[in-house]
Structures are given as C-alpha cells and as structure tokens.
Amino acid sequence: MGKKKNSPFSGHHNDLVKHSNTPFDTFFILKRTTTTNESFHTVSPFLVEKAITANLGITKSTRKLSSGDLLIEIATRQQAQQIIHLKYLDTIPVTVSAHATLNFSKGVISCGELLHVPMEEVLKGFQPQGVTHVQRIKIRRNGHLIDTKHLILTFHSPKIPDSVRAGYIKLTVRPYIPNPLRCYKCQRFGHSKTSCRGTLTCARCAEAGHDSSDCTASEKCVNCKGSHTSFSRSCSAWKFEKELIAEKVKKNISFLEARRLVKSRAPAPGTSYASAVGKKPETTSTRILPKQGQ
C-alpha cells in the first residue's frame, strides 16, 4: 500500500481545532450612541430582550448597569463574533465593547522548578492554556526584594482553571486574592491616590495636613482608630477589607454582594469588629503565600 495522502480538508480541520481552543470574550458592554447621552433606562426591557435574541439568539444573561448601559454575557464563540459587529439594537444605534475586567481572572501557582526560568519562557509555555500575563510574587527580606516560587497567572477567562501544566508538571491553580487598595493620600480603602478627593492625611498619626515621611507622633490608624499606622496588617479595617475581597473572588460576586455577606457576619451592636476578630477562631485563610520561614 502506498503512503496515505492527507485529506484536502485536513488543514482546515487543524485550523478549526486550533481556533476552538482560543479564548474569547464572554462579557460585553452595549452603549446607546446618541447626541443627548441617552441610556437604556428609558428603553422597554421587552424590546431589549427581543432585539438581543433576534440578533444573537439565546444568551446567558443581560443586565442593566447603574450607568444605563447593558452588560451582556454571551454563550458561544459565534455570539462573540456577532455581538462585536452589532450596530443597532432594533432601531437603537449602539456601540459594543468587551468588558475591561470581567473577561479575565487571576490565579496563583507555586512551582520551585520555575524559580529560575525567565518570565518570557514561562509566559510562552502557559499561553496555549489561555494565560495572557505572568507575574512573579516577591517578598522583602533585609531590605531586598527576593523572588519566590509563587506566580500570578492572568487568564483570558472569567474563571480560573483547576490546574495548568508547566511541561510535565501539573500545578493546582488557587484564587488570587489581592491586598486591599489603600489610598496613599487620605489612607482610606477602596481607591487610589490619583482618584482621591479627600484630604492629605498622615499614615502614621492620622492627622490631616502632612504625610508620614517625617512624622514622629504617636501611631494612630485613620480607619479603625487603633494604636498602629494606617498601613498595619493588624488593622481590623484592613482585615475586613481583605475578607471582603476574598469573598468576592471565591464566590465570583460583586463587591456590593460581598460587603453585604461579610457585614452579616460582623459582630452584634456594642461589640467592636476588632475585638471580634481577636476572639474569633480562624476557620478559613485568605493568605496565598506561606509565612516566612515555612
């Protein structure tokens, strides 16, 4: 028997398989394009649902945001290709864009074998598994930043996978739980210095009008009024924010929903959150890194 010839469609089949494994966006924002800044607040939800189904078929969900724009979660690659070219919803002119953050997720892996592998090589190795960015976690020791075996992987997917493969090694992916965002100007949580509308406040003594660079006053926290700096990890407010973020990440819910859940577990009136944290036994841990020396 002679050598088996390749099917004339074999190349197309390989392209199809490769294409089907490529990540695609699933969350999109629909905005009305008007000269009077109109939104979907004034549009019938019946019309919206009918128009979306007519253009895309059955999607996973449609939700109106507080801005009046629509957040649509699509179900298939074909819908992702269709929605990005959408110009009208019924007779309403619209613009469509992929959501800036919901189409991505972050996870943490730990692998000693990758400790000395260049980041470019690590990223290239993980890219076929939907990874778009890799960042090594560092710790500060004796005034120097030291590389660790822990890596933060950004996936082009709303949810992280259970595991990834670094060559022959299968690695478990854990949820990445970032530290609370604290403003370096007013010391409050939830925003950065660039968007702060508050007053310059000292991170050491909690007094307004100066920063902490030359402050020698007694320590006081802006957020919980405790006898420590505003950047202390022992702060009860910091722990509350950390628990809130962990709840959001692990349950894949909004900050508003996460805050409601965490507050529902807060101590009863008359008991400070700080004292409750001190007495409450730890049942779960939100740390992603081992303590130094472990």
Image: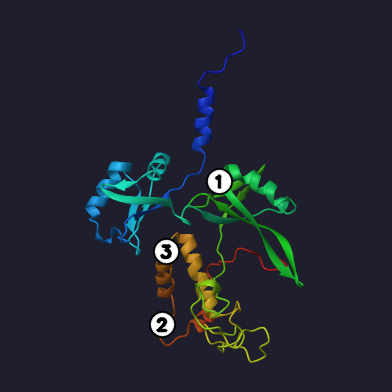
Residue 192 seen in the current view: no
Q: Residue at x 56, y 65 (%)?
A: 178
Bin the neighbour count of mark 1 within 10 Å (Cα to Cα): few under 14, some 14-19, many 20 and up: many
Q: What separation in Å lies between label 2 and label 1 (alpha carbons)?
A: 45 Å
For label 2, the SS is loop
Q: Are marks 1 and 3 in contact (CB under 8 Å)?
A: no
Cβ–Cβ below 8 Å for labels 3 and 2?
A: no
Q: Nearer the viewer, residue 96 or 177?
A: 96
What amino acid is found at the position of numbered circle 3 in the picture?
A: Ser
Residue at horizontal 55%, vertical 63%?
177
Residue shown at 67% from the left, 90% from the top: 216
Which residue shows up at 65% across the image and 44% down it? 125
19 and 129: which is toward the camera: 19
Helix or strand or loop: what does disc 3 sit on? loop
Quadrant containing the N terminus is top right
Query: Mark 1 is on which residue type?
Result: Gly
Q: What residue would you read off at disc 2?
A: 268
Looking at the image, tell me whether mark 2 or mark 1 is earlier in sequence order: 1
134 versus 76 height, above or below? below
Quadrant of the frame with the C terminus: bottom right
Quarter where residue 43 is shown: bottom left
Q: CA distance from mark 3 to mark 2?
A: 24 Å
Give x and y (percent) for residue 69. Answer: 34, 58
> Element type at marker 1?
loop
Q: x and y percent of residue 274 in the render?
A: 52, 82
Q: Which residue is mark 3?
A: 254
Question: Vertical placement of 219 versus 237: above or below?
Answer: below
Residue 130's disc number? 1
| Marks 1 and 3, how far apart at CA | 24 Å
